[in-house]
Image (spheres, rainbow, N blue to C red):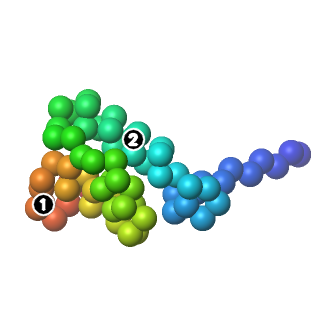
């Protein structure tokens, strides 16, 4: 039996995902016609250990406790 290994690197331990993070947030911004956010701001938020939910709340200017369940 062959075993496979899949590695998820969401916290930039193995590689720098900054550009992919930025592209994914840009996709959300364009898809839902939201106000644009500066690339450096998004990258800095991620590098300061802010999760995606926090960043999306900033993008949509929401103070809701939870955006999803």
Q: Which mark is nearer the camera, 1 or 2?
A: 2
Q: Position of residue 30 (x, y in %)?
A: 26, 31
Q: Could you tell me which quadrant the N terminus lies in?
A: top right
Q: Could you tell me which quadrant the C terminus lies in?
A: bottom left
Q: Which residue is mark 1?
A: 64
In the image, farthest residue toward the right: 1
Q: Position of residue 56 (x, y in %)?
A: 25, 52
Rendering quarter of residue 51: bottom left
Disc 1 crowd, CA 10 A, few/some/many (<14, 14-19, 20+): few
Instruction: Left or right? Give the position of 5 relative to 67.
Output: right
Q: Position of residue 68 (x, y in %)?
A: 24, 53
Q: Which residue is mark 2?
A: 24
Disc 2 crowd, CA 10 A, few/some/many (<14, 14-19, 20+): few
Secondary structure, mark 2, is helix
Give the residue displayed 20% in from the left and 60% down from the top.
66
In the image, farthest residue toward the bottom: 48
* Nearest to N terminus: mark 1 or mark 2: 2
Give the residue displayed 47% in from the left and 52% down from the top.
18
Q: Contact (CB < 8 A) between labels 1 and 2?
A: no
The CA distance from mark 1 to mark 2 is 22 Å
In front of the other: 27 or 53 = 27
């Amino acid at each position: 039996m062959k075993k496979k290994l899949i590695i998820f690197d969401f916290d930039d331990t193995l590689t720098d995902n900054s550009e992919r993070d930025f592209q994914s947030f840009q996709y959300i911004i364009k898809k839902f016609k939201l106000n644009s956010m500066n690339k450096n701001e998004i990258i800095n938020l991620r590098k300061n250990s802010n999760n995606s939910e926090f960043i999306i709340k900033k993008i949509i200017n929401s103070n809701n406790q939870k955006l999803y369940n």
